[in-house]
Image (cartoon, grey):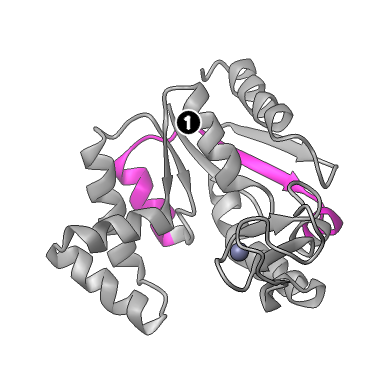
């Protein structure tokens, strides 16, 4: 089972993927984790990736592709759910030559839900603990449960910035999603509730995969 997962920021992509990993036999592979792993290994490839990350620059296509190739080789090219890759049509073409993908899981979340979710996030100034007024509110408003530190809202999580983030995501992902449209089955998971229970969403996705005979 080889899946891709796409969804806007705040769609729960990472959370759902980790849950799916526990329920069916796939490994959740997130681009960020893959980069960190490569850097840690201290290989030539890892060092090159590190240069870009240190500068805060986007890792170029070729390098990302190599990291993905190494990772997929490591897990025997099967049983994965790829999160955050491919980001471009070039990367998609590379992946296609590397391995046959079975399906694309698409998280369909409306803009107002994303805005509601992300703008409800608060982070501790002291220890970095993340809270969300919708899912896991702190016991006392504005105060961290862990260390008593003050909670704040990241600049990225302000509604006007979230709108830009959604737009950027759409611009980048649309060509990639369309690229796969006629090639592999899509499992679309609709979410119309800001605080939709994670379990329910994950079950919907797995049912969608079952219906298409994929798991
Ligand atoms: Zn704290």
Q: Eyeballing the image, is 23 above or below 21?
A: above
Q: Is residue 75 magenta?
A: no
**21 sits left or right of 189 in the view:** left
Helix, strand or loop at mark 1: helix
- The residue drawn where x is 79% and y is 38% is 196
On-image quarter of the N terminus: top left
- Is residue 73 shown left or right of residue 146? left
The residue located at (47%, 62%) in the rendering is 88
Q: Is residue 38 visible?
A: yes
Residue assigned mark 1: 21
Nearer to the camera, 9 or 214 = 9
Q: Quadrant of ligand 1?
A: bottom right
Viewed as shown, does residue 86 lie left or right of 185?
left
Q: Is residue 93 magenta?
A: yes
Residue range of the region highlighted in magenta in the rendering: 90-114
The quadrant in which residue 176 appears is: bottom right
- 84 relative to 184, above or below: below
Residue 194 in picture, x, y percent from top left: 83, 47
Up/down of 87 relative to 168, above or below: above
Residue at the image point whose x is 29% and y is 65% from the top: 62
Residue 209 image position (x, y, % from top left): 59, 23
Inspect this view and state whether residue 9 appears.
no
**Which residue occupies the extreme bottom position in the image?**
55
Q: Position of residue 111 (x, y in %)?
A: 81, 58
């Amino acid at each position: 089972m080889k899946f891709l997962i796409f969804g806007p920021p705040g769609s729960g992509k990472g959370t759902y993927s980790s849950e799916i990993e526990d329920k069916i036999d796939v490994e959740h592979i997130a681009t960020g984790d893959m980069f960190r792993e490569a850097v840690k290994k201290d290989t030539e490839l890892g060092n090159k990736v590190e240069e870009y990350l240190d500068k805060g620059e986007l890792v170029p296509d070729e390098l990302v592709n190599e990291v993905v190739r190494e990772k997929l080789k490591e897990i025997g090219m099967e049983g994965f759910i790829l999160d955050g890759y491919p980001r471009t049509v070039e990367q998609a073409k590379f992946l296609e030559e590397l391995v046959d993908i079975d399906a694309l899981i698409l998280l369909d979340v409306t803009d107002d839900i994303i805005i509601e979710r992300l703008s409800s996030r608060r982070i501790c100034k002291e220890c970095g603990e993340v809270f969300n007024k919708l899912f896991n509110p702190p016991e006392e408003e504005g105060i961290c449960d862990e260390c008593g530190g003050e909670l704040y809202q990241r600049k990225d999580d302000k509604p006007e910035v979230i709108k830009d983030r959604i737009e950027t995501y759409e611009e980048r992902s649309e060509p990639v999603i369309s690229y796969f449209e006629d090639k592999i089955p899509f499992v679309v998971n609709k979410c119309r509730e800001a605080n939709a229970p994670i379990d329910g969403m994950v079950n919907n996705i797995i049912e969608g995969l079952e219906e298409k005979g994929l798991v």
